[in-house]
Structure formats: C-alpha cells, structure tokens
Image: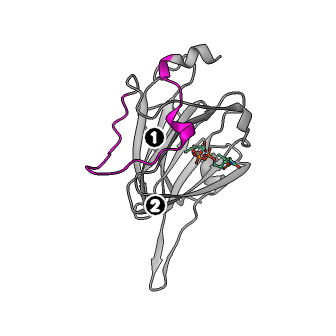
Amino acid sequence: MGQFNFIKCNIEGLYLIEPKCFEDSRGYFMETYNYQDFEAAGLNQVFVQDNQSKSIKGVLRGLHYQKKHPQGKLVRVLKGKVFDVAVDLRPGSKTYGKWYGEILSEENKRQLYVPVGFAHGFLVLSDEAEFAYKCTDFYHPEDEGGIIWNDPDLDITWPIEDGMDLTISEKDKEQIRFCELDNEK
Ligand SMILES: Cc1cn([C@H]2C[C@H](O)[C@@H](COP(=O)(O)OP(=O)(O)O[C@H]3O[C@H](C)C(=O)[C@H](O)[C@H]3O)O2)c(=O)[nH]c1=O
C-alpha cells in the first residue's frame, strides 16, 4: 500500500499518478497498478482490457473516444516519451472542451488516469515510444469516435518540434471538428 502519489489535475476526475520506484544495483522495481491503492485514492474503476502500441517519432494518435461504451484509461509509457492529451467531452462539465496535456516518459514513469467521457491522444517525442494502457471497457470499433487533432476550438498546444514530420493515420486525418460533436448524437 501507499506506493503511488496521486495528483489531481485541473480537470475534475483526471489524475496524474507517480509510482514509487525501488532502485538498486540491478535496476529498478515498481508496482504500476494496485487496486487497493487506487481505490483508497477514489479510483475504484475495474480495468478489463490492456493495450500496448509502439510508434515512431512524430506519430500522433487521437483524439479518440467511444460513444456508447466510453473507456476510462490508465496510460503510461514503457519506452520513450510522449505528450499525452485528454479532452473533457462530458456533457454539462464545467470544463467541457478543456484539454490537459502531460509529458509521460520511460524516465518520469508518470501515469495519467483519463476518466470516461474524455477524448484521448498522444504525440511521440522520442525516436520510438511504447505506450501501454488499461481500459475500463472493451474495444467497440463500431462505437469509435474521434476529433481532429488540430481542432481550432480545442487549440491544443502540441509540442511539435521544428522539422518534426507528423505521422497520422488516414482515419485520424478525417476526424470531425469539436463543434460538430453535438450533431453526432
Ligand atoms: C484501440 C484498438 C484497436 N484495435 C485494432 C484496430 C486496428 O486494426 C488496429 C489499430 O487501431 P487504431 O488505429 O485505432 O489504434 P490507435 O490509433 O492507437 O487507437 C488508440 O489511440 C488512442 C490513443 C486511444 O486512446 C485509443 O485507445 C485508441 O483509439 O488495432 C484493437 O484490436 N483493439 C483496440 O482496443
């Protein structure tokens, strides 16, 4: 117990999590998830699916969400460094349309808990990044939604370095504008 530092972000329900890391001459050990610690912090969600993806520098995945089967996500970086973004899409939220960004890396070992009702995405800043996350609901491809990464209303400050080539899937190039969201319902 007590192996995590939970930091409430400036958007209700979003948490930055710092695991305790035990370093020794062999390397390190850390618990990356513990139901008891998370429940004690008010994060008693049950995760049903783990995902992992690998991306090269400049890959931008997102901004994704599921409509009828929204997923809470506990995200972290195994290798490399990403700028991770969550956007509040919860109807009636006082921070509706507000985004939160955080550097998650192999180095800082930080995790982000993104509650249901958010769109999620990330930009890879290192040569390669391996990204792992736990989800509170299953993948429903037919239920997927997405907002274009550079939506002018969201105005996300992606840390795109000079000369960085962005790699974005065809699907993500055609995502809708934030202002079109209501028409989706
Ligand atoms: C998400 C997902 C995908 N897939 C299959 C479907 C495709 O054949 C292939 C790649 O899918 P996609 O291009 O949607 O992968 P990402 O762009 O990394 O999508 C994810 O990116 C952002 C960052 C997210 O937060 C979501 O978890 C998720 O939407 O994996 C599955 O079989 N199961 C899954 O749960």
Mark 1 Cβ and ligand 1 under 8 Å apart: no
Q: Give the range drawn in magenta.
A: 155-179
Report the residue at 45% width, 64% height from top: 106
Residue 96 seen from this side: no
For residue 85, the mark is 1
**What amino acid type is highlighted by mark number 2?**
Lys
**What amino acid type is highlighted by mark number 1?**
Val
Q: Is mark 1 on a helix, strand or loop?
A: strand
Q: What element carries label 2?
A: loop
For residue 179, the mark is none
Front residue (pair 137, 27): 137
Report the residue at 72% width, 42% height from top: 139
Label 2 Cα neighbours within 10 Å, binned few <14 / some 14-19 / many ≥20:
many
Location of residue 3 with respect to 27 vertically, above or below: above
Q: Where is residue 146 shown, x and y percent of the image?
A: 57, 32
Location of residue 3 with respect to 185 vertically, above or below: below
Residue that protrudes farthest toward the front in the picture: 170
Residue 129 is one of the magenta-drawn residues: no
Residue 166 is one of the magenta-drawn residues: yes
Q: Name the residue under label 2.
A: 109
